[in-house]
Amino acid sequence: MNSEMYIDAALRQARPRLSTLLKLMFGEAQAAGLTTQWLGSVIALMALLGFQERTVRTALFRLAESKLIKIERHGRRSLCMLTPPTAEAILAARQRLNMPAGRDFSEHWTMLVHTGGISAPRHAAARKQLLELDYCALAPNLLARPASYARDTRDGEDHGLALFEVSGSQLAAAVRQPLFGKIDWDLRTPRELYQQFQQRFVPLRAMLGQRGAFTDQQAYRIRLLVSHGYQHCRRNDPLLPRELLPEDWPAMAAYQTYVALYAGCAAQARRHLLKTSVSPAPDTAAEAPRPSLLHHRKRKPEWHKTTTTARP
């Protein structure tokens, strides 16, 4: 199989949601110093991943309705940009994604404890939000993550949870205390996702050292797909310390594959992104040539033209 076949296979198997890819695309543009994108550029970039113009327009409209992006009209063109809160959230998510998957009790940890001071619905909502910030559930009433993560110390206070900065040894002792309760972690699902990720992207990683292995367009597709795939794995990973995981846990191997491809395709992907953004496709079909009509339109014979004569 060549690189294009592997990329197409990864795209078919992943079946990524367009809204997710759009956020990743805006994040890539943001990293390249592009805070805005013409609608025509967005359509052209998403076409590489198999999405049609109308589908992209609909997805952008929904993101705008949700206040995740902003769309400005400039004559007959539309300029798209992330709203400041969305841009900040995407940058923070990328920073967390780039952090190594390995954690252990030798680190200092931030610990959030539910002491019963908030209602069950509020605690469930807070727990969901904190898990998205890469906290792990070490017990039903205990969430934690390494203190090295960029964080706002008010996270726990804002959610009504007690916040503690503890050493790993203290946290390990706390997890063993029965007062926090016991929890059964689902390790089967994330293991399968990591294994699928490796099957899709290890062959592409092996091609990185080959000269001319990928075109700029292919590098851009790979960068988005590997980001999407690894992000999906991380969201299903309980992100537990090494001491609570089996020895053959595949998270670190997947992380290394992600970093190798994401960094290895960076220069080419950025070149394609800048080229497409500097020379955007027209925003509307009316502004662009329509080959299907041009090829099938029959030329009228000369005798069809009518002539007029001047009146005497």
Image (cartoon, rainbow, N blue to C red):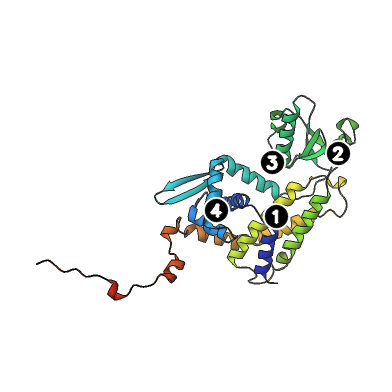
Query: In front of the other: label 2 or label 4?
Result: 4
Label 1 sits on a secondary structure element that is helix
Q: Which residue is mark 3?
A: 150
Which x, y percent locates residue 311?
Answer: 12, 66
Spatial separation of the CA atoms under disc 2 and disc 4: 42 Å
**N-terminal of the two: label 3 or label 4?**
4
Q: Which mark is residue 56?
A: 4
**N-terminal of the two: label 1 or label 2?**
2
Which x, y percent locates residue 192?
Answer: 80, 55
Picture layout, residue 206 above or below residue 246: below
For badge 3, the amino acid type reads Ala
Residue at figure coordinates x 71%, y 53% from the top left: 230
Residue at figure coordinates x 63%, y 68% from the top left: 214
Spatial separation of the CA atoms under disc 1 and disc 2: 27 Å
Picture layout, residue 141 above or below residue 198: above
Spatial separation of the CA atoms under disc 3 and disc 4: 33 Å
Q: Which residue is mark 1?
A: 229
Which x, y percent locates residue 309?
Answer: 16, 69
Nearest the eye: 276 or 183: 183
For badge 2, the amino acid type reads Ile
Q: Which residue is mark 2?
A: 183
For badge 1, the amino acid type reads Gly
Nearest the eye: 247 or 291: 291
Nearest the eye: 89 or 110: 89
